[in-house]
Image (spheres, rainbow, N blue to C red):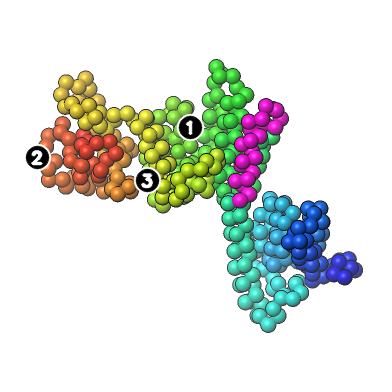
Amino acid sequence: MAAALADAQPSSAVATNLAGGLYHNAGFDAFKRSESREVVEGFYQRAVMYYAAASRLAPTCAVTAMYHADALAACERNVEAYAEYQRAASMPDPADPAEYNAGLDFNRSAADSKRLTVAEAQRSLKNFQGWITRSYVPRQAQRVMQDLKSTEIRTAVQAVKDANGLAKAYPFCARAQLLRAYALLEQANSLLPQNLDNTPALERALAMVTEASAAFDRSLLIALFRAKLLCQLHRNDDAAEECVRALSIRRPGDPAKENVLRIAGDVDRKSRIASVKQEVMVLFHYLRPGSIVTLAQNGESDEGSDDSEEEYRHRQSTMYGHKALHIPFVAGEVVPQEIVNIFALHCQARSKCSARKTVCHICSFEGNYDARVESSEV
């Protein structure tokens, strides 16, 4: 009946919206009855057809756009659904939905309807993004990772294309951005002989991860991946600075929501964050072995060192300088460098110590290396 009404009045947004809604509900009921996939998809596809027509007739109706997006998502046309959710949530002056939809509350004022519509559209967009991040992208990432291991070159190449497509379609998903770079490197490593230089692939992956790092500046995994790439490209100073940045992140995101490999690990968020931080520290120690605690580690004084006075002062200046290669911690939290400088400046013990002596653990803020670290000029 609704379809016949919509077909008889193709210029009516109310009629086409009504037909779309009835087909959408029929598809959901068929799904709950566990009917065949073909039956369920048939209802949803008809819903998409009528909602698309309604969207053309009422382009400023956010409710119609949301209904259209819901139907597209039910058909697993997620890229189109996301675009429609975005359109609904970003309408500058949406129309009163009661003008184009049957069964809505006609007792509300137009202003109230518009306000509630905008809030609902933004909530729908956020919910869809959450579903994409938590469910859809992880499933697709698992498939991409499996295809990358295929001995069929076409399958592996398509996997890289799919990873690129996910990153482009869902810029709000950190896992999708990491997957793109990871897939590129996996393909390069599998196709290139071991004796060939893979620097071009590393550079491309670094560009991708650097872009992701700017968008997700609280991601420890992205920072760690970027530091590893910089290390592989022999840019050790940049890699060390990225490690420092990673350890300085306040309220980092949960690594479980970003991990491409989805390896089972620590059960709680705090433990997962601590585990990634530990991996960052391991990399940092590799990049800066002994740069802070060479003397303390060896248990030797600095006398007899082959360093010139200039080299010694340069090495010292890197500890409390702007690069902050020493990473001070208190109760597991990174202490800002300016706070370290203030403590070192006002330390009464330092006034009695020579420039060549070590300072106590208070000044090193429970440093990860030793209870003693070399003092330096501030």
Q: Which residues are the magenta region? A: 135-157
The residue at which mark 2 appears reads as 352
- Helix, strand or loop at mark 1: helix
378 above or below 203? Answer: below
Residue at image mark 3: 248
Earlier-in-chain disc, 2 versus 3: 3
Q: Is residue 147 magenta?
A: yes
Q: Amino acid at mark 3?
A: Ser
What residue lies at 47% left-to-right and 43% top-to-bottom? 265
**Three-letter residue code for mark 2:** Lys
In the rendered image, the vertical position of residue 332 relative to residue 369, given as above or below: below
Q: Nearer the viewer, residue 367 or 197?
A: 367
> Residue at position x 24%, y 36% from top?
370
Q: Earlier in the sequence, mark 1 or mark 2?
A: 1
- Residue 354's spot in the image, x, y percent? 12, 34
State the residue at coordinates (55%, 24%): 198
Give the image location of residue 137, x and y in percent: 61, 47
Q: Dot 3, how many residues are within 10 Å of its Cα: few (below 14), some (14-19), or many (20+)?
A: many
Sooner in the amino-acid sequence: mark 1 or mark 3:
1
Which residue extends farthest left? Answer: 352
Magenta-drawn stretch, dominant element (helix, strand or loop):
helix
Is-magenta flag for residue 49? no
